[in-house]
Amino acid sequence: MTFDDYKNLIHGRMSEYRFVHSVNVAKQAKRLAKIFGCDEERAVVAGILHDVTKETPFEEQLKIISDGGIILDSVESKNTKLWHAISGYVFVRDVLKTEDEDILNAIRYHTTGRAGMSLLEKIIFVADFTGDERNYSDVDVMREKALRNLDEAIIYGLQFTITDLAGKGLTIHPDALACYNELILKDEKDGS
């Protein structure tokens, strides 16, 4: 499939807001891929598809996940906001027949991150935070960090997410904590 094919596919699956967000993530992913030496075409594909099931009803997402052979862990089963990354991964793998594991993992881990992220996974994680339509407080700081150092941007994004979830008394996925800890330890090692 071409980028335009993917764009048409997602346009029919989501609201205009979510479509614009997905296009912006693809654009930002391409920008970051160029800066950090990642394959731009793969970055654009992962970016445009990252939210492919975001607005799919929860019951349908659960069916996609289950049919795809994925068993949700205790944190995932209680947090429906994580489902679209998992169902999106299965949808792109099984329905769109994408075999590129890096693209699949970039979709799968774009909400939580994980330890051992590839360059493409990092780019999609950061692009999701920094697309043109994003306007949360400190988005300019996040964008500046994204252009300079992906790990720094991921740490910043995870600090925001972890603090927000903890402040609301919500669970934090172990993958997010593992990603954060890995990058903090790497940063300490590099700084010493």
Image (cartoon, grey):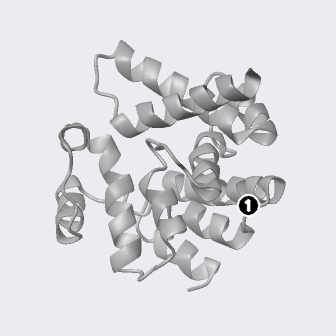
Residue 157 x/y as whole percent: 57, 31
Instruction: Give the camera-side residue of 140 and 187.
Output: 187
Residue 142, quarter of picture:
top right
Q: Is residue 73 above or below residue 46?
A: above
Q: Is residue 8 above or below residue 16?
A: below
Tell me which corner region of the image, top left, top right, bottom left or bottom right, holds residue 57.
bottom left
Identity of the residue drawn at 33% across and 78% down: 94
Residue 185 % position (x, y): 58, 27
Residue at the spot 56% in from the left edge and 82% down from the top edge? 5
**Residue drawn at the location 79% of the way across and 60% of the way down:** 37
Relative horizontal placement of residue 31, taking residue 90 as reference (left or right): right
Q: Position of residue 149 (x, y in %)?
A: 76, 38
Q: Secondary structure at mark 1?
A: helix
Residue at horizontal 19%, vertical 58%?
62
Residue on which the image places disc 1: 30
Quadrant, the C terminus: top right
